[in-house]
Amino acid sequence: MKTFQILATAAVVGGLALSVAAQKEDGWISLFDGKSLDGWTVKSGFATYEVTDGTIHGTTAKGSPNSFLCSKDEYGDFELEFDVKVHDKLNSGVQIRSSLKDIEKENSYGGRVNGPQCEIEASPGQAGFIYGEATGLGWLSPEPQDKDFSHSLMKNGEWNHFRIVAKGPRIQTWINGEAVADLTHEEIYKTHPKGFIGLQVHGIGKEPGPFDVAWKNLRIKPLN
């Protein structure tokens, strides 16, 4: 019996070791522990962020500018995955390779977040395309500049799976397994080759609200 117990314990320990090794070989890093906002900080506005049932919930605050929950770590080339669900009346996005400017400016709430943003919004069908948040460049993806362009890959009020691959000046996105953006933009890469990840709660001005956006299963794989 003792021999059996020793062998069983060794098998369990060995299995755990293999599991950890597999995770390391896989290269994925969890950005969210499912219980707290450790490793994240709010910038640019005063929307609220909290964790409920393993999910990050961002809630609008009347009069707040765009708010961002920003990772403390920075990333250059990577693959990013997450699930997101957004209220029908709310626009959102996920910043990549982003930075802060106007940190000392009054009412900047820790600095203005700027950099490439993956759009999250069902209407007018621009989700997954890349916008230059506070860069002065507007849309980086050419498709949303066409007034007749739209798609219906993302559904507001439902969980949607996003995948983003950023390598050099090229940024690719997928929504629910369908390819959306495939962008090569040398100008934004020169100014933003590396930076934090940011989860946006868009400002709503004096709209009634509050509106909610939720994220879960956030993970990243650095591509070195």
Image (cartoon, grey):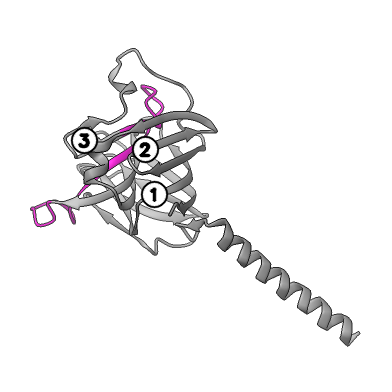
Badge 1 local density, few (<14 within 10 Å), some, or many (20+)? many
Q: Position of residue 37 (x, y in %)?
A: 40, 61
Q: On the rendered image, what quadrant is the N terminus found in?
A: bottom right
Tell me the residue at 51%/34% (across/down).
158
- Residue 71 appears left or right of 65: right
Tell me the residue at 49%/57% (across/down).
30
- Residue 103 appears left or right of 113: left
For mark 1, what is the residue? 77
Q: Which residues are magenta?
A: 102-130
> Residue 206 shows which numbered tag?
3
For mark 2, what is the residue? 170
Tell me the residue at 40%/30% (across/down).
182
In the rendered structure, does residue 52 fall within the stretch colored magenta?
Answer: no
Tell me the residue at 19%/40% (across/down).
134
Say which of marks 3 and 2 sits in front: 2
- Residue 7 appears left or right of 140: right
**Above or below — where is 143 with respect to 127?**
above
Q: Position of residue 5 (x, y in %)?
A: 84, 81
3 or 2: tag closer to the N-terminus:
2
